[in-house]
Image (spheres, rainbow, N blue to C red):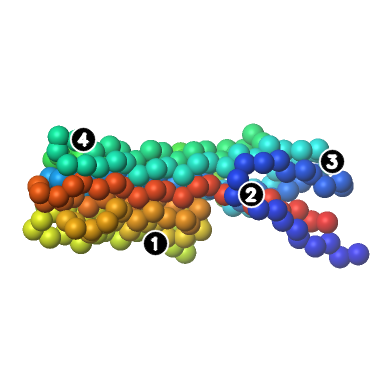
Amino acid sequence: MTQQLKGQEFTASGTFNVPTGVTAVKVTMTGGGGGGGGSTNTVTPAGGGGGAGEFVQGLMVLVASGGSVTVTIGAKGTGGTGGPAPAVATAGTPGGSTSFGAVTVAGGFGGQPGGTTTSGNGGAGGGVKGGALTLGGTARKGNPGLPEDWWFSGGAGGGSSSNSGVGGAGGDAPGHTGGTAGTSTIFGAGGSGGGASLWGNGGNGANSNFDAAAVSVSNYGAGGGGAGSQAADHAGRAGGNGAPGYCLVQWEA
């Protein structure tokens, strides 16, 4: 009798009940993406993009036939807050870790807020070889994540916002690109893009001045875009949310 590959997806935390006769499964999953940084009503710089979560592909995990395994899905990182002075913009929060039993992948870090000459940094990607923190001052694309071994890879980093009003793009992942930087005008700076994940592109950075809040993403594990900064007579904006984690369990039966 020919065996077929079966699978179960988890987009929320739960329990994997191991089918009778199954002693090994393949696991593919990602941690949550970090949120983008918020902005104030100062011209430069804007919010940095959030980093993507670490991911693992097709990892073989031994399980007990008829037993159960706890699956935890990492929460999305939320975008940092913004507001007019004297309010101080905040960084995006990091994404949560996703786990299948004892196997864990880390969430991405949040992008830093805009509003001062030393802010606007892009969040680092999750994992040992996640894309490094990118520093504001010169717009930079977030570093892509790097393979840690045959199965694990670090998440892509978010882009950073420059003091000259130009945002940076987020880092890339296999098959997907980091979020684009928002456009800049004389009234403000464009926010930076979030890191991409294996499941989709990162969130785009928001345009400067009259634009709405930065772009949130629904692509599992991707980072949210950074908020664009505003002219002094307009309110600051919130950064975009990252995306939650994900887990796929596969087995032959």
If the image is split into quadrants, where does the N terminus sit? bottom right
| Alpha carbon distance from label 4 to label 2 | 37 Å
C-alpha distance separating marks 2 and 1: 24 Å
- Seen in the image, is 156 located left or right of residue 24? left
What label sits on residue 10 in the rendered view?
Answer: 2
Q: Which residue shows up at 42% across the image and 48% down it?
A: 242
Query: Could you say which is closer to the camera, residue 178 or residue 34?
Result: 34
Q: Are marks 3 and 1 in contact (CB under 8 Å)?
A: no
Under mark 1, the amino acid is: Thr
Q: CA distance from mark 3 to mark 1?
A: 40 Å
The mark closer to the camera, 3 or 4, is 4
Q: Which callout, 2 or 1, points at the residue further toward the start of the chain?
A: 2
Q: Which residue is mark 1?
A: 177
Quadrant placement of the C terminus: bottom right
Q: Which sits in the foreground, 75 or 29?
A: 75
Label 3 amino acid? Gly
| Mark 3 or mark 1, earlier in chain | 3
SS category of the residue bearing label 4: loop
The residue under label 4 is: 88
Query: Which residue appears farthest toward the right when viewing the image?
Result: 1
Q: Amino acid at mark 4?
A: Val
The part of the image, by quadrant, that contains residue 135 is: top left
Q: Hey, which quadrant is residue 35 in on the image?
A: top left
Label placed on residue 66: 3
Q: Are marks 1 and 4 in contact (CB under 8 Å)?
A: no
Q: CA distance from mark 1 to mark 4?
A: 31 Å
**Few, some or many residues within 10 Å of mark 3 (<14, 14–19, 20+):** few
Residue neighbourhood size for the residue with mark 4, other residues' Cα within 10 Å, grouped as few (<14), some (14–19), many (≥20):
some
Residue 193: x, y in percent?
Answer: 31, 55
The CA span between labels 2 and 3 is 19 Å
